[in-house]
């Protein structure tokens, strides 16, 4: 049997595999309620609110289908989170349209906006990464015990790993992208087939529901 290329890469990176299981109804509403579990895939229909440093105040995972997405859970009192910014920003700029590194925090937008401006000036850094503020959704779906905490999502919508800051290296991103891009057409086709099946089931359930 042919070995799954993505699984091989994740194992090489010592990534802890998991996937996201969400109800079809929650996907349609754009507000999933179930916690992250080992089964299912990330619904790319999720739309995030209160986004800073981006072309819009909202961001949809669907816009980044076909790319490697890395969620960076952080907060303003996490020194190691801030220290990692230059490294993360350089990775985002180097790989450009091939990846999205998304900073995620539960803290309010105004506080984050002021903090980022002050720290960026002190570090002589202009962040190119979007920042999700006031977050409850992603933290509810993926509870974290420490920061920084990274969640890697491949182009087909599957979570391929969760890591600490030491695994966020240029080498690991490069090898992951290499394997992902070799396997991408098949994964996207699989994802689209699953999404179509889910929508069909949801439509059937809706039509059979008592009025």
Image: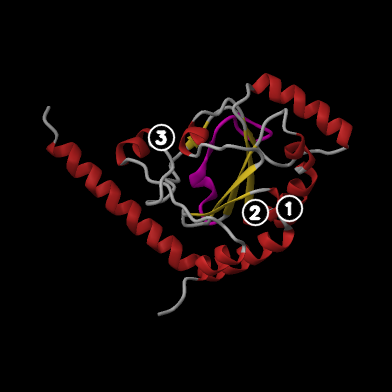
Mark 3: few/some/many CA within 10 Å (<14, 14-19, 20+): some
Query: Could you tell me which residue is drawn at 34 percent across and 37 percent down?
Result: 28
Magenta stretch, residue numbers: 51-66
Task: In the rendered view, tell whether residue 210 sits above or below residue 71.
Answer: above
Q: What number is the disc on residue 23?
A: none
- Find disc 1 in the rendering and name its residue: 91
Position of the N terminus, as image quadrant, is bottom left
Q: Which of 92 and 136 lies nearest the eye of the viewer?
A: 136
Residue 106: % across, % down = 59, 27
Label 1: how many Cα within 10 Å (few below 14, some 14–19, many 20+)? some
Q: What is the quadrant of residue 130 in the picture? A: top right
207 vs 110, left or right, is left
Between 196 and 79, the residue placed more toward the observer is 79
Q: Quadrant of the C terminus?
A: top left
Residue holding disc 2: 97
- Mark 3 highlights which residue? 30
Comparing labels 3 and 2, the label whose residue is closer to the camera: 3
Q: What secondary structure is found at the residue carrying circle 1?
A: helix
Q: Is residue 150 above or below residue 207?
A: below
Question: Disc 3 and disc 2: Cα gap in Å?
Answer: 24 Å
Residue 56 percent across, percent down from the top left: 60, 32
Q: Tag 2, which secondary structure?
A: helix
């Amino acid at each position: 049997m042919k070995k799954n290329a993505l699984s091989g890469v994740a194992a090489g990176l010592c990534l802890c595999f998991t996937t996201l299981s969400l109800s079809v109804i929650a996907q349609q509403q754009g507000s999933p309620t179930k916690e992250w579990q080992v089964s299912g895939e990330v619904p790319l229909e999720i739309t995030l609110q209160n986004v800073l440093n981006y072309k819009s105040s909202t961001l949809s995972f669907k816009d980044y289908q076909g790319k490697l997405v890395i969620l960076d859970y952080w907060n303003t009192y996490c020194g190691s989170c801030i220290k990692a910014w230059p490294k993360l920003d350089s990775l985002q700029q180097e790989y450009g349209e091939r990846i999205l590194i998304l900073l995620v925090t539960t803290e309010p937008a105004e506080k984050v906006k002021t903090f980022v401006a002050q720290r960026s000036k002190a570090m002589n850094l202009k962040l190119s990464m979007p920042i999700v503020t006031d977050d409850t959704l992603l933290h509810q779906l993926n509870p974290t015990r420490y920061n920084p905490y990274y969640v890697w999502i491949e182009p087909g919508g599957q979570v391929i790993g969760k890591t600490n800051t030491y695994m966020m290296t240029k080498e690991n991103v490069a090898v992951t992208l290499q394997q992902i891009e070799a396997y991408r057409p098949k994964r996207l086709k699989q994802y689209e087939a699953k999404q179509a099946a889910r929508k069909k089931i949801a439509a059937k359930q809706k039509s059979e529901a008592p009025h």
